[in-house]
Amino acid sequence: MVCPNILLIFTDQQRSDTIHAAGNPVIKTPHLDRLVQEGVLFRSAYTPSPVWVPARCSMIYGQYPHKTGCADNGDPMPEDRPSLMQVLSNTWDR
């Protein structure tokens, strides 16, 4: 099985209307435009937390902040469960 190249970009307070390829005629974002053309653009997205560390923990672990224990930016990421990266790595290492 071929291992795909997966690139997750986490920006802070990024809206899709701040990217030229997503319809903003004024702003110039050539690198993001290329990623949009060759990848996926999410026009609607929701976060389980307005705070960035808990939001990213939720995406990485697939659980809400109250389940990951990441409720604030200073909270450590849990080590007692597999992350998305570990699951993908184990899947493609076979």
Image: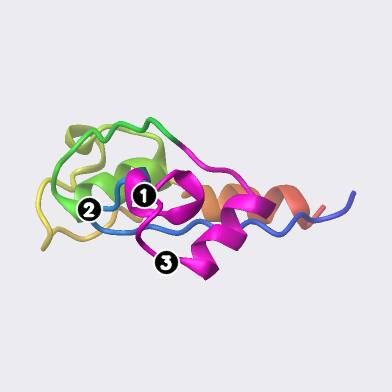
Question: Is residue 89 at least partly visible in the picture?
Answer: yes
Q: Amino acid at mark 3?
A: Lys
**Secondary structure beneath label 3:** loop
Q: Which mark is residue 21?
A: none
Q: Residue at label 1?
A: 80
Query: Residue 21 placed where, x, y %?
Result: 51, 51
Could you say which quadrant of the image residue 35 lies in? bottom right
Camera-nearest residue between 93 and 53: 53
Q: Amino acid at mark 1?
A: Asp
| Residue 32 highlighted magenta (yes or no) | yes
Question: Is residue 7 at least partly visible in the picture?
Answer: no
Label 2 packing within 10 angstroms: few (<14), some (14-19), many (20+): few
Q: CA distance from mark 2 to mark 3?
A: 18 Å
Q: Compare marks 2 and 3 and give the one earlier in the sequence.
A: 2
Q: Compare marks 1 and 2 and give the one earlier in the sequence.
A: 2
Label 3 packing within 10 angstroms: few (<14), some (14-19), many (20+): few
Q: Looking at the image, which residue sits at the far front?
A: 25
- Specify start and end residues of the magenta stretch as a single range: 17-42
Residue at the spot x=80%, y=56% of the render? Answer: 3
Relative to 30, 27 lies left or right: left
Camera-nearest residue between 41 and 12: 41
Residue at the spot x=28%, y=57% of the render? Answer: 77
Q: How many marks?
A: 3
Q: Compare marks 3 and 1 and give the one earlier in the sequence.
A: 3
Residue at the spot x=38%, y=30% of the render? Answer: 44
The relative height of residue 80 versus residue 31 in the rendered view (above or below) is above
Of tags 1 and 2, the one toward the viewer is 2
**Secondary structure beneath label 1:** loop
Q: Which mark is residue 13?
A: 2
**Secondary structure beneath label 2:** loop
Q: Amino acid at mark 2?
A: Gln
Query: Residue 87 placed where, x, y %?
Result: 59, 47
